Image (spheres, rainbow, N blue to C red):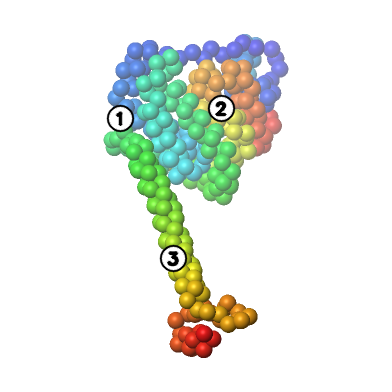
């Protein structure tokens, strides 16, 4: 097997440290991404908003220590991943995760497909597929879910995921493979 | 490689692990390419739903201006100091009340002792008369008259 090359341009350290000086701009730029990741991970709007705030608060307090070794995005995502992990440890939150529906995501997906001109049948099938993926994601372990969301929602490459999660690239691949298998089985794809 | 990609191969592919043979086969085999496409398309739909779900939330918009969070350390210290002050005050008040009560009790006991001492030293007891009869118990006239009778 040949490893897929997963390099991506990373801004240099000077740019990164300059960027963080204007923290207002940092928040404007990265807030939607952090919030989206938190929402997909926790499936709770209030918890996601609170997590995004905590993430930027932590980053703000630690900004002097940021040396630009990793990209600012990676650094913020690292903080978010740690906060998500801490939130998931909270048993009460898990209870709310189970009881609160994540249905809006499915509805939005189908609406968006319908808007794009898909046939009603196609929209229904797409809705079912998306629902199956969300449903499978809910059954994943916290680490597998994090890796899966970073890859397929946030579009991070394997090296970035490794940097964000602190895992080795090979371990990221293993978690990703298992997550994809769980999704495939949930979708009933045996071909 | 003539073998079709298995479902596990496709998962491995999507996880970033693929061989050049598999890549070549996928390029040539329409069926495998279609299966791969279906999986990729499902993941793309999932990505779209996550993005749209996030964007539809009011909280997804960044704050208009990032105000550096006010450190509540000073407030916390003030609250802690106020709590400590209340605790100490309550404790001091309680101690003070107890001391006052104790002092009043001591004063009453002292007064009684003085009274007992004065009355016993003034009275001349009869033979075998109990000393208790010599003392005036309380300010009532009945007791005083009884005490005088006893004298």
The chain to which mark 3 is attached is: B
Label 3 neighbour load within 10 Å: few <14, some 14-19, many 20+: few
User: Contact, CB < 8 Å: mark 1 with mark 2?
Assistant: no
Marks 3/2: CA–CA distance: 80 Å
Q: Secondary structure beneath disc 2?
A: helix
Image height check: is A91 above or below A78?
A: below
Q: Secondary structure beneath disc 3?
A: helix
- Circle 2 residue: A147
Quadrant where the N terminus of chain A sits is top right
Q: Nearer the viewer, residue B137 or A168?
A: B137
- Circle 1 residue: A24
Mark toward the viewer: 3 or 1: 3
Q: Residue at x 56, y 38 (%)?
A: A88
Q: Residue at x 29, y 24 (%)?
A: A22
- Circle 3 residue: B107
Q: Position of residue A46 (x, y in %)?
A: 45, 44
Q: Secondary structure beneath disc 1?
A: helix
């Amino acid at each position: 097997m040949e490893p897929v090359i997963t390099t991506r341009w990373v801004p240099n350290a000077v740019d990164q440290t300059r960027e963080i000086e204007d923290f207002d701009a940092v928040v404007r730029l990265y807030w939607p991404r952090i919030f989206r990741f938190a929402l997909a991970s926790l499936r709770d709007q209030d918890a996601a908003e609170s997590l995004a705030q905590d993430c930027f608060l932590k980053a703000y307090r630690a900004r002097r220590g940021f040396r630009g070794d990793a990209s600012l995005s990676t650094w913020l995502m690292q903080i978010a991943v740690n906060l998500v992990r801490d939130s998931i440890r909270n048993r009460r939150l898990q209870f709310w995760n189970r009881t609160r529906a994540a249905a809006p995501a499915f509805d939005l997906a189908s609406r968006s497909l319908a808007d794009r001109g898909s046939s009603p049948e196609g929209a229904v099938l797409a809705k079912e597929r998306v629902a199956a993926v969300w449903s499978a994601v809910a059954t994943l372990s916290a680490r597998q879910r994090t890796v899966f969301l970073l890859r397929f929602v946030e579009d991070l490459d394997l090296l970035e995921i490794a940097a964000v999660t602190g895992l080795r690239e090979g371990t990221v691949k293993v978690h990703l493979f298992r997550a994809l298998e769980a999704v495939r089985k949930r979708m009933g794809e045996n071909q | 490689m003539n073998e079709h990609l298995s479902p596990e191969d496709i998962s491995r592919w999507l996880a970033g692990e693929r061989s050049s043979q598999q890549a070549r086969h996928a390029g040539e085999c329409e069926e495998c390419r279609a299966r791969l496409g279906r999986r990729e398309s499902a993941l793309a739909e999932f990505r779209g739903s996550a993005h749209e779900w996030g964007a539809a939330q009011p909280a997804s918009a960044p704050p208009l201006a990032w105000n550096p969070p006010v450190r509540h350390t000073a407030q916390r210290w003030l609250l802690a100091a106020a709590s400590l002050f209340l605790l100490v005050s309550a404790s001091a008040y309680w101690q003070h009340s107890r001391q006052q009560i104790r002092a009043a009790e001591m004063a009453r006991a002292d007064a009684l002792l003085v009274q007992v001492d004065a009355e016993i030293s003034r009275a001349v007891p009869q033979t075998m008369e109990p000393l208790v009869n010599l003392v005036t118990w309380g300010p009532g006239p009945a007791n005083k008259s009884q005490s005088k009778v006893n004298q």
